[in-house]
Image (tube, rainbow, N blue to C red):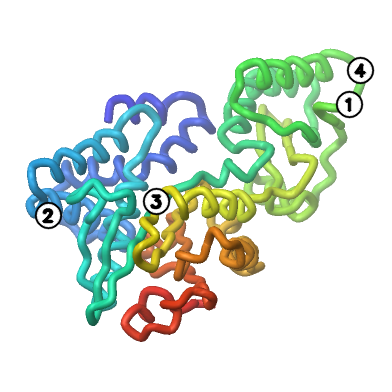
Amino acid sequence: MADIVAMCGNGHRAGRAALHRHLLELTIDRLARAGERALTPAEAAILRLAQATTALAGHLSSDGRARLLAALRFGLADDSTLVPLFHILRTAAMQQARGFTVRFAGFADAASFDLLITRDGIEAEIACDTMSAEDGRDVHRGAWVQLVDRIDPDLQTWLGAHPGRYLLKMTLPQGLKSAPDSLASLHDRIKTMLAGSTRQDHDAAAVLRLDPLMLAAAQADEAGLLAGVRREFGNEAHLAVTSAGQGVFVLAARAGRENEIAVAMRHRLGALAPARLSGTRPGILAMFIEDTDRAEWGELRDRLRLEAETRQFLAYPSARQVVAVTCASRHEMMADAGELRFRNTGNAFAKVAALAPAVMSTM
């Protein structure tokens, strides 16, 4: 917890990103210290998963408990989180609620898959996996918040000498990752622009343009500014606001192409099926997509991007043993909701009634 608190205090935007990333750990710690009080739905969902972890430990053999503790310790090391472990526990709880008997085969038997579910004599394997949405972004959110935190003092100083409202638009065809050299190079280019009279800078790595910010007075606060710029740049843009006195500086960055989070998930599914499923039973791949916000997740879901890429994967020969793919995010975990589910109609077990609650498509 000391490490997490230090991360959360490391820079204004980076700290807020760390708060979101480590919400599970911070909530458990806070609830352990708090007295009796009414819990929010998200707190109650997190608490149930924490309690399920300790209950599971009591039912495992010594070897199984050792494997569970290893997963727990891994989730609490460095910048890791409890999300992958809680994803397994949450998936198990949903299947139990649907009438399945669930065995934690990964912990109990060191199986390559995580759960073995049984209903009416029919068995299926579930492999749970967590991937970051950053895998499908050219401009990483983690790198973006690091860049903004390091450039923010320069912008405040510059605004002190140049009061007004400004917009720096950045297109980054080669993307932006958290590599120190990449961040330092872009930081230096922005400082050079501010120090000189030029308002444009472009090469193969970045196209930068500094313009007056033309938004209505009613949009003067940070939320209004971001909403206005968001309408122009779209949901995939990375935005930040720096202010000093009456001066306002908005940064907007986007990659040279659309994010491909759903495509990255399809590639991940292709690697998971042969590696995690035994091939002797029908298999379910339960995907948890991290590092998304509500708007981005809603777009992935409502524009059917996840469905399209999943169904493309299910048409591959390598998906023959997969009877269904499920997708969830923190939105479902915190709301104690279900998941998106896509059935593989080409699998021989797709129409077996015993498996229907776990494999029937939700869309």
Judged by depth in the image, the label closer to the viewer, 4 or 2, is 2
CB contact under 8 Å: marks 3 and 2: no
Precedes in sequence: disc 4 or disc 2 = 2
Quadrant including the C terminus: bottom right
Is the residue 44 above or below the residue 80 in the image?
A: below
Disc 1, SS: strand
**Nearer-the-camera pick, 13 or 129:** 129
Residue 79 circle label: none
Judged by depth in the image, the label closer to the viewer, 1 or 4, is 1
Name the residue carrying label 3.
276
Name the residue carrying label 2.
55
**Nearer-the-camera pick, 49 or 243:** 49
Distance Cα–Cα, label 1 vs label 4: 15 Å
CB contact under 8 Å: marks 4 and 2: no
- Horizontally, is 255 left or right of 178 in the view? right
Quadrant including the N terminus: top left
